[in-house]
Image (spheres, helix red, strand yellow):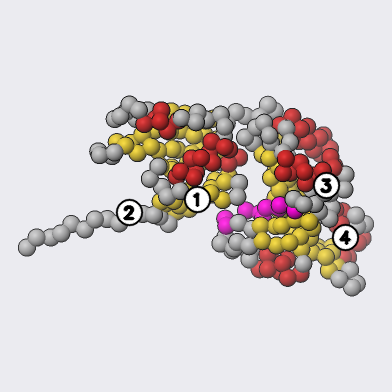
Amino acid sequence: MFWRKLKKKKQVEIVKLITNGFEVINGSTVSFVRWSSIETLEAYKVDRFTTDEICLNIGFNSKTVLVTEEFIGWREFAIELLKKIPTIDENWEGNIAKPAFEINKTQLYKKVPVENTLVCSECGKTHSEWPALAFKAPANYSFLTDLEKTEQGKLDSDFCEIHYTDQIDRYIRGRLVQKLNDACECLEYGLWVSLSEKSYLDYQENYNNINHKTSYFGWLCSNIEEYGNTSSIPCDVVTSSGNDRPEIFPHDDFDHDFVRDYYGGISKLEAQKRINEMIKNAR
């Protein structure tokens, strides 16, 4: 009797673009990587007998994930990678592929530390990367007296409520990523947005649901010093898998300098200036 050797089913391998980053799916393992968190990129080639396979080790947040040209979504990922990290040689895949049968291990990218370490105003720790410019409370809560905060307010790191006699105002904290025109880094803000009761309760109910993906309409409720009054800018608040804070997208048709800079970008020098100002005010 002859026994047929069963071929082991190959695990699903996918690299999928998401907002400000990508997912790497390898079987039941899913890794979420932000473009801004990439620390190193090391490319090499593996001999698969009949063909060669280009591989990329991605270092991020002191971890490493592997992506290869055999992953579903590789081409879209490779194109976006060159856009997000323009210092990479656009012909890097061809350089790795030749000559045949050689590993050709090559470091494509290594993040250069920022010029100065920064003390975060929120956690008090020293960061070697840019900290988020975070607001501890929505502007509406900050305007309350100490007595009003005690009697009417309810605040933690992600939720805020203000109870008036005739209504309850509800806020959540999200993140807004400001792109830079002359650097691959991004400047991240921790901002507050007011939501309707229905949206607020839905977000609160699904707060620990890592697969919850949706969007809400809201109004920005944080005043960014460089722009004066930035409260009441209409925006969309988009949740993402992985339990990251939801991302804030101002409506592009709203006439405001902050909105124009969000979509048009700012310089790295301006971003560093804002960070230094935050550190100074925190002292």
Q: Secondary structure at mark 4?
A: helix
Query: What is the CA distance from the residue labelled 2 to the residue labelled 3?
Result: 51 Å
Reply yes or no: does residue 6 show up in magenta.
no
Q: Secondary structure at mark 2?
A: loop
Q: Give, as a single range, the part of the protein colored magenta.
A: 241-251
Dot 3 or dot 4: first in sequence order is 4
Q: Which residue is mark 1?
A: 16
Could you tell me what secondary structure mostly forms the magenta stretch? loop
Q: Position of residue 13 (x, y in %)?
A: 40, 51
Residues packed near mark 1 inside 10 Å, few (<14), some (14 to 19) or many (20 plus): some
Nearest the camera: 128 or 250? 250
Name the residue located 62 percent from the left edge and 35 percent from the top edge.
184
Q: Position of residue 118 (x, y in %)?
A: 71, 34
Residue 42 falls left or right of residue 120? left
Dot 1 or dot 4: first in sequence order is 1
Q: Secondary structure at mark 3?
A: loop
Q: In the drawing, what numbered circle is on residue 149?
A: 4
Residues packed near mark 4 inside 10 Å, few (<14), some (14 to 19) or many (20 plus): some
Kind of residue at badge 1: Lys
Kind of residue at badge 2: Lys
Dot 1 or dot 3: first in sequence order is 1
Say whether marks 1 and 3 touch (CB < 8 Å). no
Nearest the camera: 11 or 262? 262
In front: mark 1 or mark 4?
1
Q: Which residue is mark 2?
A: 10
Kind of residue at badge 3: His
Say whether marks 2 and 3 touch (CB < 8 Å). no
